[in-house]
Amino acid sequence: MAGSTHSVSNQVPPLVGYDVFTADRALTAAVERHLDPDLLDEVLAELSALGRASGSAQVQEWGTHANENPPRLRTHDRYGERIDEVEFHPSWHRLLGKGVSAGLTAAWGRPGGHVRRAAAFLVWTQVEAGNGCPLSMTHAAVPALRTDPELAAEWEPRLTSMVYDRELRPARLKAGALFGMGMTEKQGGSDVRANTTSARPLAEDGTYELTGHKWFCSAPMSDGFLVLAQAPDGLTCFLVPRVLEDGTRNVFLIQRLKDKLGNRSNASAEVEFDGTWARRVGEEGRGVRTIIEMVAATRLDCVLGSAGLMRQAVAQAVHHCTYREAFGGKLVDKPLMRNVLADLALESEAATTLALRLAAAYDDGGEQERALLRIAVPAAKYWVTKRCPPVAVEAAECLGGNGYVEESGMPRLVRESPLNSVWEGAGNVQALDVLRALQREPGALDAYLREVGKARGADHRLDGAIKNLLTELADLEGVEGRARRLAERLALVLQGSLLVRFAPPQVADAFCAARLGGDGGAAFGTLPHTLDLAAVVERARPVS
């Protein structure tokens, strides 16, 4: 037997066995702020239950197993019959089932539904982001289907069900259903008007036969898909069921699954349509207008997903530094490490606060709030998702070499971190969408300025940033070339205004100094040393 060469010491216990929701002070404060007080006890209990599950050893193990065992495509059965099925690890099904039962597809019909769902989505993302795509697509399909009351009456109860039914059979026989989406094609990418998939009308009114392909099809194991195709009168939205009413499989040829950088447990596919049966959603030629509400909802989920990833990265970094000793003391007490952690915490809290504010606007549903969403969603999607990768990388570095090792979980966060910036329209698409809102919908800018104006006079750096933003907005000549800069400033000013109004003074002060006042560097850990950084770090510490 080999002798012992050393004793193991100064190791950090795993961050497990805690309530992911209640340990997040920024998130709990946002939920309490935006929900009707009569709902609060019920929702806090609901979210705490999900938070305890998310922080449990068992559910974290599900996330690890799902990530380590990616889905597999089975195009044919043993007899050579085409089946086009995707096989997932049992842990992935457990995660997806838990997400459905937690209401992550049930926002549209519940009081305070969007805020409670947004908080739950942010919590659940921290376990394993790979089950978020079908949850997001199913949730987001509802407003698109509502353009056709008959279709909505048929499908909405299935999509908002809190029952996960994984079997492929006619949707009318299922207690719950999931939706995916197919928009982009090889030749067009984000330019969906360049799509070539054709839709030929059939004898039955509203039914068509599709021929073509989709380069990216989300959640290919779903029960139905919203798809764009060229009908006689132009680009149109269609519902493609996976299984037809008589029990036969629709023609849905999965050619291959994408081998992705991250998001490994989720399946993204290339699919072909060859005489595929479909029902029209909305009017012919108005496909983009029909599906745009689905896109907006999934973009908000990109913000929430990135906020969740950032929160988990920061929680792991602060947890590690709270226990790890070096150079004669705890890392968390070292001034320079404290600066890094505080800077990361600011980014996380700003993302969470903004995301929940947008969810609350969905719940409100008023004209002013809808106008705010038109400009704030693409700006938030642009900026928050862009901030996720540097936060994940810096947080991993806080663990030193351990953060580069798979067992720490940090590499999974790093690989996942660019995803939400790419999906549902990459950065340029979001920035240009902000410009469209500014140029075509004056009510959107008015709603935005009313929102940020609620914090005017509370911080001179915020006031200066608002003034500078107005100067930029007054000169729209050559604006396309600076669309990213404009989207960034819109998001930062909105984050600053929310933090000034709702966050602890130490958080708001630090954010305004570094993000709006120019008193911070390009890298994390360059906050002014005169700030109360210990309070900022303590607020981010994951203790229930």
Image (spheres, rainbow, N blue to C red):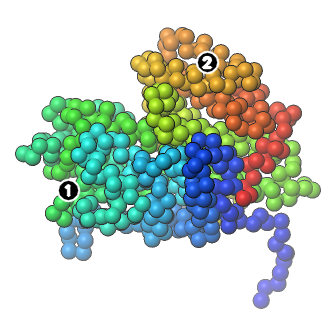
Question: Does residue 247 appear left or right of residue 481 in this picture?
Answer: left
User: What residue is disc 1 on?
Assistant: 251
Q: Position of residue 110 (x, y in %)?
A: 45, 50
- Number of other residues with Cα within 10 Å of mark 1, as a class: few under 14, some 14 to 19, many 20 or more: many
Residue visible at 84% across and 77% down in the picture: 5
Judge whether 56 appears above or below 214 on screen. below
Residue, far left: 203
State the quadrant of the C terminus: bottom right
Question: Does residue 16 appear left or right of residue 491 in this picture?
Answer: right
Report the front residue among 59 and 521: 59
Judge whether 336 appears above or below 432 on screen. below
Q: Position of residue 392 (x, y in %)?
A: 64, 48
Which of the two marks, 2 or 1, is nearer to us in this view?
2
Residue visible at 39% across and 54% down in the picture: 160
Q: Amino acid at mark 2?
A: Leu
- Alpha carbon separation for disc pair 2 and 1: 51 Å
Q: Amino acid at mark 1?
A: Val
Residue visible at 19% across and 65% down in the picture: 247
- Specify whether residue 222 is in view: no
Question: Does residue 441 appear left or right of residue 233 in this picture?
Answer: right
Judge whether 378 appears above or below 208 on screen. above
Q: Secondary structure at mark 2?
A: helix
The disc placed on residue 469 is 2
